Each structure stands twice: as structure tokens, then as C-alpha cells.
Image (cartoon, helix red, strand yellow):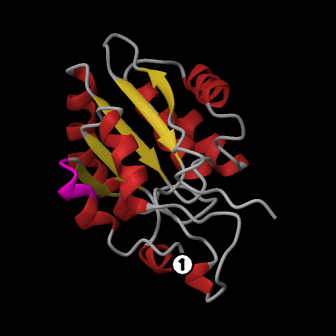
Amino acid sequence: MKTNRSVISPLQIDAIAVPGSGGLIGMTICPGKDEYAGLGIPSGPWKRDLDLDLQVIRDWQAQALVTLIEEFEFELLSVPELPEKTRAFGIRWVHLPIVDVWVPDRVFEEEWEVAGEELRQILREDGRIVLHCRGGLGRTGLVAARLLVEFGMAPREAIRRVRAARPGAIQTREQEEYVLRCKS
């Protein structure tokens, strides 16, 4: 089995341009994830280095890193220090957990009122944000598409653009239906 390491396989950030601004939305996997170490297995296909991955995000000039994983996933993916290390790299850290392969709940929606506006402001000012979940597909694609809709893009076009930039994004019917219900 091939192991995906940060040194030989730098973090890939797939980007989408925000309509009406020079802002970019980046999508990626969980930085630093060591998926099997959190389960007590010494190595697996993902054995990344958090510092190297955060350096890639900083070099990409992201102003914010949006983490969509749930609390238990920090240990599962061996990244309990993600919030502190992100801040140490000078990147704003935003935690908006969504259940894997699902859609945002009431708590997310309440937190989005403030966090979403902060992220949209960064993008309006031609800034860059990076979204991630575990694999950078379902939850990440959903939030990227939602942001595009909030910037005036039609929901179906937002889904198409996200999937063109990151094949496999927006993984479930429920996630797709959620985006289709989003409004600008």
C-alpha cells in the first residue's frame, strides 16, 4: 500500500474563483491527517505532516482555514493540535463541524450567521480561504458550493463548478439537495 506523505506529495489545494471578486475558495483534505494512527494502527495510506501541510496553506496565502470535521475526528485523524498550529502559522482558524456525509444542522446554521459573513468578507476583499473536512469532498464541496450561491451563482452551476475543480465533491443526494435549496 502506498503511503501519502507530505514530503513526497505536497498538500493539493483545488481552487474555485468567486464570482464578482478576486477571491478564491480552496478545497483540500484534512491537513496533517494520519488516518490510521488515531485507530492505533502504525501506518496507512495517509501519514501527513501537519506543519508541512499548514506551510502549503500559508504559501497559498489563505487568510482562513475552515475545519468542517467533528470534534472526535481530531483524534481519529491525529490532528488534535490543528487549531493552535493553524493560528501559529498566522492563519485564522474557523471550526464549523458537519456530520460526515451529511448536511449542516441547526447549530452550524446559527454559527454560519457570523462565520459565513467573515468568510464572505475575506472573499469580497479578494482574499483566499481553504475549506477542509476529512477527505475534502462531501462537506468541503457542500460549503464551497454554498459560498458560490451566496455570491450569486445558481445552485446547479455552483455544484458543477465545485465538481469540475474537485471531482467527487458533494458526495450524497442530501448534500446536493441542500445546495439546491441555498439562496444568495
Q: Is residue 23 magenta?
A: no
Asked if 178 appears above or below 99 in the picture, the reply is above
The front one of 161 and 9 is 9
Residue 91 in picture, x, y percent from top left: 22, 47
Lateral position of residue 15 relative to residue 160, left or right: left
Residue 99 in picture, x, y percent from top left: 54, 66
Lateral position of residue 50 relative to residue 34, left or right: left
* Quarter of the image where the N terminus is located: bottom right
> Residue at the location (39% across, 42% down)?
56
Q: Which residue is mark 1?
A: 76
Task: Give the residues in magenta.
Answer: 86-90
Residue 89 in picture, x, y percent from top left: 22, 51
Residue 48 in picture, x, y percent from top left: 53, 61
The front one of 166 and 85 is 85
Lateral position of residue 23 relative to residue 159, left or right: left
Lateral position of residue 104 relative to residue 86, left or right: right
Looking at the picture, which amino acid does disc 1 mark? Leu
> Residue at the location (57% across, 44% down)?
178
Q: How many marks?
A: 1
* Quarter of the image where the C terminus is located: top left
In this rendering, does residue 184 appear at all?
Answer: no
> Residue at the location (22% across, 30% down)?
122
